[in-house]
Amino acid sequence: MSDTTAMIEVDDLSAEQAGAELARLAVEIAAHDRAYHGEDAPTVSDAAYDALRARNSAIEARFPDLVRPDSPSVRVGATLQSQFEKITHRVPMLSLDNAFNDDDVADFVARIKRFLRVDADMAFTAEPKIDGLSLALRYEQGKLVSAATRGDGVTGENVTQNARTLDDIPEQLSGLDVPEVMEVRGEVYMGKADFLALNESMAAQGKQTYVNPRNTAAGSLRQLDSAITASRPLKFFAYAWGDVSAVQRATQFEMVQLLGQWGFSINPLMGRFDSVDAMLERYRLIEAQRAGLDYDIDGVVYKVDDLALQERLGFISRSPRWAVAHKFPAELATTILEKIEIQVGRTGALSPVARLTPVTVGGVVVSNATLHNEDYIAGIGSDGAPIREGRDLREGDTVTVYRAGDVIPKVMDVDLSKRPAAATPFVFPVKCPACGSDAVRDINAKGRPDSVRRCTGGFICPAQAVEGLKHFVSRNAFDIDGFGEKQAEAFYTWGLVVNPADIFTLQKRNERSLTKLQNRDGYGKTSVDNLFAAIEERRSISLTRFIFALGIRHVGEGNAKLLARHYQTIEAFLAPMEANATLLAQFGGDGVALTKAVNKDQVEGGEPWANLVSIDGLGTAAAQALVQFFADPERRRVVDDLLAQVTPEPVELVVSDSPVAGKTVVFTGTLEQMSRDEAKAMAERKGAKVSGSVSGKTDLLVAGPKAGSKLTKAQSLGIEIIDEQGWLDLVGG
Ligand code: IVH
C-alpha cells in the first residue's frame, strides 16, 4: 500500500492509509537521518527531505492518535529538547493521584484523617486543575534566576530565557516576606481565545494549525528562539513551591495569597473548605463554570491546608499523600468497533484492542481503544458481576468511547439497537497469537480466574521476549542511546539480541561475525560505534533502574525504587529471594496466607518474607510476583547472565544526622499519637529501615500498649526497647 499512499494528498487519506503512510515516512526519514548523521553522504536534497517531514507533520496533525513512538516528529522533539540545558530540581516535581467520583474524594479525606489520627474537621483547599505544563521558577534575593520545565520530575529543561518573556512571570518579587531563595511553581497555559486566534492567523498564512491549547503552550515554551515564545500569548498561574529558604506562612491558602501579593496571577476560584460536602460543592461550581473559563481545566485539585500536616503526610512514590486531583468526567463519542485484535505484552498478558472508525473525542482523533480483557468484552466485571448490564461487545457494533486525560481511549458501552444481524460473540483466543502456546487464566487469591489471560510460552514467545527487551531499554530502565523499541524488534528478528544480557555481548559477537552490523540496512560505521559506546556506558547502572528493567509484574518504577532503597545492594536484594521462594512454596504460592502466618510468628525462618512485605507501599502482589520471578530458573539464568555483564550500583541513602539513620526499627502494639503508617513513613524519612518482625538484625523496638510476642522476643534478644513518646523524642517529633 505504501507506494500508492505516497501519492495521496494528506486531506484525502483514510485513517488506515494514514497509518501506513506514517510507518513508511518514519522508516524513510530515519534512513535519511542516518545517512546524514552517519559517515555516508546525504541521500536526498534538503528540499525533498523537508517535504517528507512536512508531510509527516501534516498527517500527524490530522490524525494525532496515529503518532508513532518512533515518529520523526517525536525524535526531532527529542533533539530539540536536548539543546536545552538540564536543570536538576532540588525538590522533585511530582504528579498527583486521581479521584474520579465523590466517593474517591471522601476516601481521600478519610485516609488522611486515619493517617494523622485526626477526628475533627480538617481544612482543605480546592482549586481548578489547569491543563497546561508545569514550570518551576527560582528566585534568589527576589530576582528570577532560572526557569525549568518538569521534565521527568527529577530533571527538567532550562527555559529561563523563554519564561522571562511571559507577562505573568515577574522578574523581581516585591512585597512582604520574600525569602532569600524562593522556587515558585505553577502552570503555563494558553487561553482558549488566544489559541483560536493564533490558529486563525496560522491558517491565514497557509501554515499548519495546532491541535489544542496545551500542546501549543508546551511547544511555544520550548522554542529555541525566545522571540517566538515572546510572540505567543502564554500565561502562568502560580499554585505551589519547591525549594525555599523559608516557608513564610503556615497554610497552603495563605502561601498562595502571598504569591499573589508578590505579583503572580493566582486562580480566583481557589477556596478553603472544612468538609467533604463543601469541597464537592466547590467542585460542582468550578465544573459549572468550566465552559465559560478562558483556559482549559481538567479537574479540581484538593490539598491539605495546614503545611505542618502536609509535611507529616509526605509522599507515596511520585505523588503527595496530601493532595488529589478530582478529574472531570470524560467526553464521550460514538463510533463503530471495526475489529478486535489481540496484543501480547511483556508479561504475556493477552490484551484486546479495539480498532475503531476514527472519531474525534475532546479534540483528538481516536482510532484505537483498549478493551482491557476478555471478561470486559463479554460484559463481566472484575468481581464477576455484569457490567453494561451484561451487554457484550462484537465486531461491527456501534460503541461509545471516551478519553480521560492522557490515558488510552476506552470503550464504554454498546448500542444494541444498531448491532448488525450477522454480528457474532467475540471468541477470545486460548492460544497465544504470537507463539501458539496455551494462554491461560490463573486462579487469583479470591479463587476466581484472573481477568487476564496469559501466554504460557515464557521465553519461547517472541512477543513476550520483544516486549521485555523494549521495556529493558526504555527511558526509565537502561535507556541506551540508539537502542529503542525499533532496534529491539530488529535485533530480535535478526537473532542478535534474544534476551537483555545479549545486548552486552553484541559488540564482541559482531567483531567475530561475518554479517557485521555496520553492513546492515540503516547502519554505518559511525552509528554502530555510537551504539556500542552507549551500551558500554550502561555497564554500570543504578540498582533502581536495574530492578525496574527486569520487567517483573507489579514492579514498576515506584516499587523498584522502594526495593533498591530497602536492600541497597544487588546481593542483599537477591539473597532473600531464594529463601522466600521456599517459604512461598510452602503456602502454595499464596502470599497473603504466608503474610498472615508470618505475622502470627507461625513460620520458622519467616524473616526474609516479613522483611520484604514490611517495605512501606510495596504490597503483597508485588512481593509474590518478585519471588515467583526469581524462582523461575530460566529468568534467574538471564538475571545471572546479565549480572556477569553489568554492575548495579549500591544505593547510597541520603545521610541523615538522625540517631535512627541506618537502623532497623520495628513497631509493635498500639500507637496513640500517630498511625502505624505515619510512624513507618517518619522512620523512613529519617533514614531508618522499618521491618515487620523482630530478629537479630533489629536495632530498636518501639512498643506501645498491648505489645505481644514481638516485645517478648525483643526482650529475649536484648534489643533496645522504647515507647511511642521515647520514639518521638528520639526523632524530634
Ligand atoms: S499541585 C505535588 N495544583 O497537575 C504536586 N498541580 O497531575 C503539586 N496541575 O504536574 C501539583 N493545576 O502540572 C497542582 N492547581 C494545581 C494544578 C496542578 C495543574 C498540574 C501540575 C502537575 C500535574 C499533576
Image (tube, helix red, strand yellow):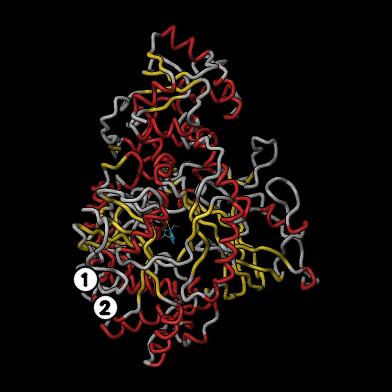
| Image location of residue 367, percent across then percent down | 57, 71
Which one is nearer the viewer's eye here, 697 or 60?
697
Q: Is residue 458 left or right of residue 26?
A: right
Q: Is residue 725 visible?
A: yes
Residue at 34% across, 84% down: 51
Residue at 33% across, 36% down: 643
| Image location of residue 281, percent across then percent down | 60, 60
Residue at 29% across, 69% down: 169
Which one is nearer the viewer's eye here, 133 or 453?
133
Q: Ligand 1: does it lie within 8 Å of the C-beta at label 1?
A: no
| Image location of residue 618, percent across then percent down | 48, 36
User: Which circle marks residue 137 in the picture?
Assistant: none
Q: Secondary structure at mark 2?
A: loop
Dot 1, crowdedness within 10 Å: few (<14), some or many (≥20)? some
User: What residue type is disc 1 on?
Assistant: Asp
Q: In the picture, residue 518 is in which quadrant?
A: bottom left
47, above or below 474, in the image: below
76, above or below 630, in the image: below
Q: Which residue is mark 2?
A: 43
Q: Is residue 258 left or right of residue 706?
A: left
Dot 2, crowdedness within 10 Å: few (<14), some or many (≥20)? some
| Image location of residue 626, percent across then percent down | 48, 35
User: What residue type is disc 2 on?
Assistant: Thr
Q: Is residue 512 visible?
A: no
Q: Which residue is mark 1?
A: 40
The answer to whether the residues at label 2 and label 1 have Cβ atoms under 8 Å apart is: yes
Q: In the picture, residue 41 is in which quadrant?
A: bottom left
Which one is nearer the viewer's eye here, 86 or 180?
180
